[in-house]
Image (cartoon, grey):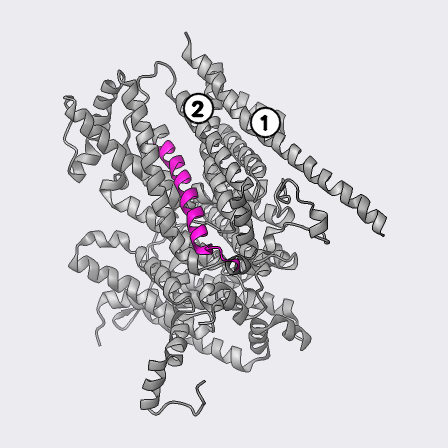
Amino acid sequence: MDWDQILFWVMIAIWVIMPAFIVYEEIRERRALAASEAPAEEIEAVNE
Amino acid sequence: MLIPAIWIAALTYASELTLLSMGFTLTYLTAKVPNFAHGTYAGIGIYVSYTFSKILGFSPYLGFPFSFLIGGLMSIIIYFLVIGVLQRLGGGAIVLTISTLAIQIFLAGATNIYAFWLRAKYSTYAMLFMLKDFDFKIGDFPGIFIVSVGLTVSCVILLHYMLTRTKIGIAMRATAEDPELASVLGININQVQVFSWFLTGGMASLAGSMIPIWFMSTPTTGAAMITPIMAGSLLGGFENVYGAVIGGVVVGVSEIMLTYWGSVILGAWVGEYRPLIPMIFLVIILLIEPRGLQGAWERMTASDTGQSILKSLGLLKEEPVT
Amino acid sequence: MIQEIALGLLTSSVAVEGTSRLIVDIAMYFGLFVIVAMALNFQYGNAGIPNMGCAVQVIIGGFTVSAITTRLILTLVGNAGVEILPWTSDYDWVYNSPKNVNIVNSWLSGEPLFGVSMLLFTLAVSLILGAIIGWIIALPAIRLRATYLMIVLITMADASQIFGRNVVWISGGTLGIFIPDIFKWYPGDRTLVMAIITLLIGLISFFIFRTMLNSPYGRLMRAIRENEVTVGSVGKNVVGIRRNILMFASGITAISGALLGFYFSYVVEANYQRALWTYWPWLMLILGGPGNNAGTFLGCALVVAMRRVILVNKWFLQEIFFFPVAYFEQILLGVLLISVIMFRPNGLIPEKLLYIPGVNYRRLVDEEVVVDWRGAPKARGASSGISGIFRMLGGKKEEAGE
């Protein structure tokens, strides 16, 4: 059992989790932020 | 009158440090930023001296005016390229300070490269050197002692004259106090800034060019001096330049004398800890009284005990104390 | 750019196995720096504490490994009956260190549990010592702000280097101490194990930081960064919170230093230089964007990639520039810092508003909210002139009207 190969790919996996998670989170947050502002814009448009 | 050799070293070092601290305080007063690269300007001066003496074969003293000019020019260039731009873009204090740190890193790298190039081209060892052989003697004293103390004293006098009598000097003080008001009064802030950067860069370079005549120098000697420089300026307080004079002298003399006495009393290992002395000064000053000696003086005279002492000495002005 | 990086990776004149070794090396350095950069982001980007002395936090981790762990291992191994050379006096400590390490290593090759427990012990101790250093750093941070704080912290980092260089029992002065290889029991490439552990710790700390940032505590931190007088007046213990933040971030940074010691199996003060562990992390932070973890990650990735590419192409570069690559890196660091500050001060990924579920920002804020860390001290009400600066930099004492 070649530990080195296995661990190598484990390392790559861990290395990739972080950016993947970050990207996922950022997209989700920015979308939620934009969504929370959209209805308010409609209200503002109505108010004006 | 015979002065022990260690005092000669101490006073020489203290004069050079005082020049540097004055420049540092001046930069802080006019540009509102602690110039971390100030020590590296001195590094430029160190290598101008080296170039003049070992490469070109003249006495390093001849290089003094050149090092002043080169230092001033470098300072102006850096102002135009970096600091002025950042100030115009609206940078706060932290950003400007980080930029001076970046400048310091850049200049340190450039100094390293220059020393390396000198070694490659002229086969001289520019990484660690001392120029004592190029010195002359006045009576029993090494020339650099007289020159450094004399130069520093004359600089203080000249600076005082300039700041109080000449137009540009008063303009500098006005800009330091309140830039907006100064510009309303018709002072060209930009010109004043350029002039002050030229002056401080030149002074730093001048002080730097004196250093290798007595002390061993490396490419990083200039940059490493920033800690004693800041300690000297902080000790004097940033209210005006004269505080830096006191601060520079105290820190410079203490650094050398304390190391010397320490090595006499405790052993030679104390020498390694020499850079620690200005650091301790710095930390203690910042923790106890960030405004330095002047702040401490004001605090003391404003306190009750201070007032009673002054009253008993008959020095108290007639003012109602609320 | 990706092509150039790939080319840089591939033109390293070693065999294919060498390339994967390069990747492991990059992963290791990236892991180390990402931990430090994330902790720095925690301190500066989120709490507004410009910690220019993070080298001292890293070095404490290294000192833990050299001063404490190695001694512990030597004691335990000696008690287990293995013949090791004397190491208690200063001279023996440094001089016998490489030989002792060889002896201990051969014993360690059969003791996986011992190795792992030593690792955990080191991490725990460096966490604690890092927190102590954080407490020490917090002392000036109470009274000082902005530039004065930076000055003190840089000085502390320099001082720690002087101590490390001269006090022999900490890390062997200028000669350094060799560290027993706690992963000797692993049959293959130990750097792989180290890289995995480092990345794992990076991942864990990332999640810890993220949780803290998205919690009410995170909002508290940002509130303190923006306007601490208000926060103080609401009744929060600003001083205590800052201290906690510093202690926590210090502990995590120290872990990075300890891992570095284990990676090289060698601890010497010169490995922990100020330039490497303070300025480069700051560049990563500023380049990526202070205030969010995504930016830190990106900045870290870019800088580590750039440095490795430079290193791999060292011979080529030294043909063009006649001087050693180290000086070139110095110049590059300075130039990059200045460029980023001038042209993209918010970093590549600018900070966005905190997303709080259920809060409709439009109703609360009727102007464009731009998060601009550049003008930070100005936002604290500094007026022009010297008195303004002293009022600002003198800290709480002056504001309290003493």
Q: At 29% across and 47% down in the image, what residue appears?
A: C163
Tag 2 and tag 1 share a subunit: no
Q: Quadrant of the N terminus of chain C?
A: top right
Q: Which segment did they paint magenta?
A: C234-261
Marker disc for residue C196: 2
**Residue C246 in the figure: left or right of residue C342:** left
**The residue marked by circle 1 belongs to what chain?**
A
Q: Residue at x 40, y 50 (%)?
A: B220
Q: Which mark is residue C141?
A: none
Type of amino acid at the residue the image marks with label 1: Ala
- The reply to whether the C-beta atoms of the residues labelled 2 and 1 are less than 8 Å apart is no
Residue B285 in the magenta stretch? The answer is no
Of C362 and A15, nearer the camera is: C362
x and y percentages locating residue C180 in the rendered image: 27, 26
Q: Report which residue position mark 1 lands on.
A: A20
Under mark 2, the amino acid is Ile
Q: Quick one: quadrant of the C terminus of chain C?
A: bottom left
Q: Please tell me whether mark 1 sits on a helix, a strand or a loop.
A: helix
Which structural element holds mark 2? helix
Q: Position of residue C246 (x, y in %)?
A: 43, 47
Image location of residue B10, percent across then percent down: 29, 66
Q: x%, y% of residue C186?
A: 34, 16
